[in-house]
Structures are given as C-alpha cells and as structure tokens.
Image (cartoon, grey):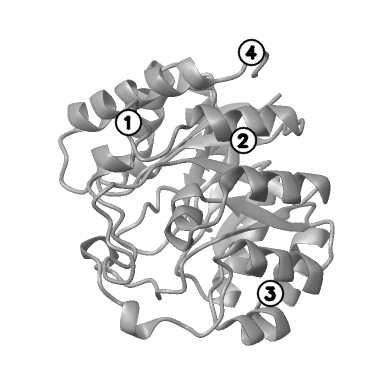
Amino acid sequence: MLRYTAEILPYHDYPFEVAVRELAGLGFREINLWSSAEPLAAHVNPGDDPARILAVLDRYGMRPCGLTMYGKTQDEMAERIEFARELGIDTVIFDCEANYPDFVATFLPPLVETAARNGVRIAVENHLTVPFHAGFESGGGEDRRWDEGVDTLAQITRLVTDIDHPNLGICLAPPHLWVVGDGISEAITFLAERKRLFYYYIWDIDRAYRRGADGLNFGPGEKQLPRLDGTLDHAVPLAALARVGYRGPASLKCHGTGGWPLHRVTDELAKADAYVRSCLPAGKD
C-alpha cells in the first residue's frame, strides 16, 4: 500500500539534521528532500557530499523518497537529477516551468532523457499557472498567469499523452486541483490506470482562499496542514489511493511556516500527523 512520508519543506528555516531529527521524532521513516529556490527549502544541493547526507538520514533511521527542485533552470534540474541518483532517490519533483508549448517542446524532453539515463523518474506537479516568485506566500500574480500549464485534470491528461514516457508522471497536489474545481479521486484513478501517479501530497488549503485573487497563497501553514476541520476530507483521497493499489509516497506537506519557532513547526505537524494517521487505510506501509 501507500508509503506515508513527510516533506522537509516546513523546516526550511532550520538546518538539515534538525529537520531530519524532528520528523524522525514524529515517527516518519521516509523524507522528501528539497533543493529549490528561496524561500523554499534548499537543504541539499549538487556539490554536497551524498555520503554525509545519507549518514545523517541513517543516524535517524530515515531514507529519502524524493528530491524537489522548484525555480531552477533546465541545466540546474539536470544536475539535480544526477544528484538524485547519487542519493539513491528514484523520483524528482517540479512543476510546469514554462508556458505549456515551450515546456513540452524544449524544456521537458531533454530532462526526461537525462532522468531515464540515470534511472530516475520525473513527477510534474499539477500547479496553478501563476508564476513562482520569492513572495508567493503573500499571494497575487494572477495577472501574470501563463495561457497554458499543467493545473487542471484536462491539462494533466494532455501532458501524459503528449509525452508518453515511463519516466514521466505526475505529483498530485490536492489544493491546486481544488482551486480549479477538479476532483482529487478522479485524478488519482485516471493516473493510476495509466501508471503515471508517481507522488502524492497530503496537503490542504485555507477555506478563506479567494479564487482569482490569492494566487499561490494557500493560507497560513496551520491552515494548509490536514486537519479534521479543514477544507478537504483526506480520508476520501487516501481511500482512493488504496483502492487503486498506489504504492508510492503520500507525503505530509505545507508552506507558510516561515519565521515559526522550531517547536511550533513540530507541534503543528504533530497535530496534522495524528489526523492523517486516523485517515490512513489499513495496510499502509
């Protein structure tokens, strides 16, 4: 069954070993590492010693389940695909980094070939076409949307049809689907049928989110974490993942923790973790 994992992202203000220690203390055994642009997490990067990174993970009984790399150039992503191989990571994650025609014509194909040569898969996140910028957590940017990207289920369908390659799939982000009004369970089923569901975020969105105004601001961190009174009933998509036999990572995620003291990050994750565990279907890894 699915593997319940965690993102290192909420600890972007803290050192790598501190983040690993805190997540291990919550009971996680797999962690998605980030090598992204500010203000996102960048705990590991090409040029770092893979042996040292793996030694820290091993010290806390953890192993890496992915490498996320948003806001990077094509060359920087290629470097990180090779870096993922050195870390024993089989999946890298990023979003549609250009207007869709350019993304599928020139940006993505060479990266898919690099990934295939290195035994790595690319999971493209379904993501609003509001361009990433350093202040994305404050919202805005709706006026700069690209004409086309990979955000709706129809556009997800188009991507995996236009580039039908076993090393290319999707990282499914529920809040982005919620914003565009698409069903999460429907997307899970579609991708699972085609063996293109590579990664899944357990992630919520503030009920106060204003479509067409708030851009990538999904609310404060505690409102993005799964919770009983949240926007999404996470038991439903988690049951759908179980129903389709998904065996990949289902990873606890949020933005919006910048400036939080360490204890608050861990305390809020602990509350979300308790809720998610109550939703997990029997038989999860």
Question: Gap in Å between the C-alphas at discs 1 and 2?
Answer: 22 Å
User: Dot 4 corresponds to which residue?
Assistant: 282
Question: Gap in Å between the C-alphas at discs 3 and 2?
Answer: 23 Å
Q: Nearer the viewer, mark 1 or mark 4?
A: 4
Q: Amino acid at mark 3?
A: Leu
- Tell me which label, 1 or 4, sits earlier in the chain: 1
| Left or right of residue 208, residue 2 in this image | right
User: Dot 2 corresponds to which residue?
Assistant: 249
Query: Which residue occupies the foreground of this view, 283 or 77?
Result: 283
Q: Nearer the viewer, mark 3 or mark 4?
A: 4
Q: Secondary structure at mark 3?
A: helix
User: Dot 3 corresponds to which residue?
Assistant: 108
Q: Amino acid at mark 4?
A: Ala
| Left or right of residue 178, residue 108 in this image | right
What residue is at 34 percent from the left and 25 percent from the top?
228
Question: What number is the disc on residue 18?
Answer: 1
Q: Nearer the viewer, mark 2 or mark 4?
A: 4
- Tell me which label, 3 or 4, sits earlier in the chain: 3
- Tell me which label, 2 or 4, sits earlier in the chain: 2
Question: Gap in Å between the C-alphas at discs 2 and 4?
Answer: 16 Å
- Tell me which label, 1 or 2, sits earlier in the chain: 1
Rendering quarter of residue 135: bottom left
Q: Secondary structure at mark 2?
A: strand
Work out whether residue 86 can be spotted. no
Query: Which residue occupies the foreground of this view, 225 or 179?
Result: 179
**Label 2 environment density (alpha carbons within 10 Å; few <14, some 14–19, many ≥20):** many
